[in-house]
Image (spheres, helix red, strand yellow):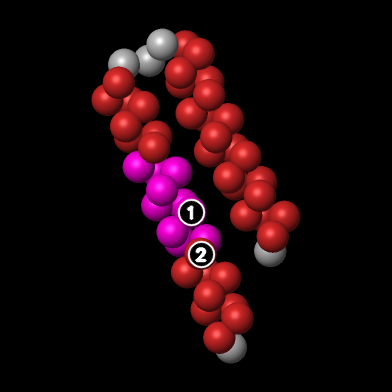
Amino acid sequence: MEELATLITAGAWGLVALTLAAGIPFAWRKVLAYIEAKTQLSLAEAVRRMLDE
């Protein structure tokens, strides 16, 4: 599970880095940051549920 979380996080950060490098408008960067935050939150919830079981 940790590998999956790391992979998803790395992918999300990769998207953010590509976005910044490409100079995509600020609104898109905010959307990507929001998606990254939601991904982190959902992963944290999934891990917490696994640990609770």
Report the residue at 57% width, 70% height from top.
Answer: 47
| Residue of label 1 | 40
Instruction: List the single residue furthest toward the right.
Output: 3
Q: Residues within 10 Å of mark 2 (few under 14, many from 20)?
A: few
Instruction: List the single residue furthest toward the bottom.
Output: 53
With 20 as the anchor, is 25 left or right in this view? Answer: left
Report the residue at 52% width, 70% height from top.
Answer: 46
Q: Residues within 10 Å of mark 1 (few under 14, many from 20)?
A: some
Quadrant housing the C terminus: bottom right
Main SS category, magenta section: helix
| Residue of label 2 | 44
Quadrant housing the N terminus: bottom right
Specify start and end residues of the magenta stretch as a single range. Answer: 34-43
Looking at the image, is 38 positioned above or below residue 17? below
Looking at the image, is 22 positioned above or below residue 38? above
- The percent position of residue 41, horizontal first and vertical second, equals 44, 59
Indicate the secondary structure of the residue bearing disc 2: helix
